[in-house]
Image (spheres, rainbow, N blue to C red):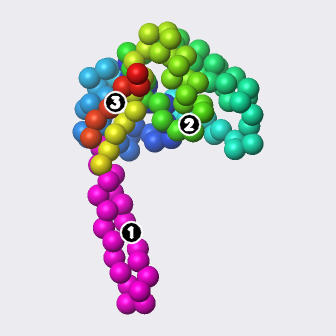
Amino acid sequence: MFINHTNHASEKWPTAQKEAAHAWGEIEDLPFPDIGADWDEERVAKIAVENAAKILAEKPCAVLCQGEFTYVYHLVNLLRAAGVTVLAATSRREAIEEQAEDGSARKISRFVFTRFREYR
């Protein structure tokens, strides 16, 4: 099983990303928590421990974990200590910049999935 623990539902992923995830098994989404900017380190660590227990109960082959940095740091360390492969998705950005007649600029970015990279 491949657990997607991000703010991006796997149903909206491009085909290439779904195919890469399926190398580890069926994809299961576990929504990323809404970590408050005012939370202290202990509260962040507590929710990381709670979600690590939920994830480990599923016995995943791999977990995609991306989001709020301090939470990800705690969770990745907990999962790796339990022997779970934890991944980040990488992409390349394709940007188009348009200039309006008034001189203002607008940049449109498209992110193209490239691969999964393991946290080590």
Marks 2 and 1 sit apart, C-alpha to C-alpha, by: 26 Å
Q: Secondary structure at mark 1?
A: strand
Query: Magenta stretch mostly in which secondary structure?
Result: strand
Left or right: residue 31 versus residue 64 is: right
Q: Above or below — where is 86 with respect to 9?
A: above
Say whether residue 106 is magenta: yes
Nearer to me, 35 or 18: 35
Residue type pointed to by label 1 = Lys
Residue identifier under label 3: 117
Asked if the residue under mark 1 is in contact with the one under mark 2, i.e. CB atoms within 8 Å, the reply is no
| Upstream in sequence: badge 1 or badge 3 | 1
Q: Quadrant of the N terminus?
A: top left
Residue type pointed to by label 2 = Phe
Residue located at (25% from left, 32% from top): 19
Residue identifier under label 1: 107
Residue located at (58% from left, 24% from top): 74
Q: Above or below — where is 35 with respect to 24?
A: below
Q: Secondary structure at mark 2?
A: helix
Residue type pointed to by label 3 = Arg
How far across and down, in percent of the image, does residue 38 sit? 75, 42
Q: Quadrant of residue 43?
A: top right
How far across and down, in percent of the image, does residue 57 sit? 53, 11
Q: Quadrant of the C terminus?
A: top left
Tell me the magenta residue range: 93-113
Q: Residues within 10 Å of mark 1 (few under 14, many from 20)?
A: few
Marks 1 and 3 sit apart, C-alpha to C-alpha, by: 27 Å
Residue 64's label in the rendered image is: none
Q: Secondary structure at mark 3?
A: strand
Asked if the residue under mark 3 is in contact with the one under mark 2, i.e. CB atoms within 8 Å, the reply is no
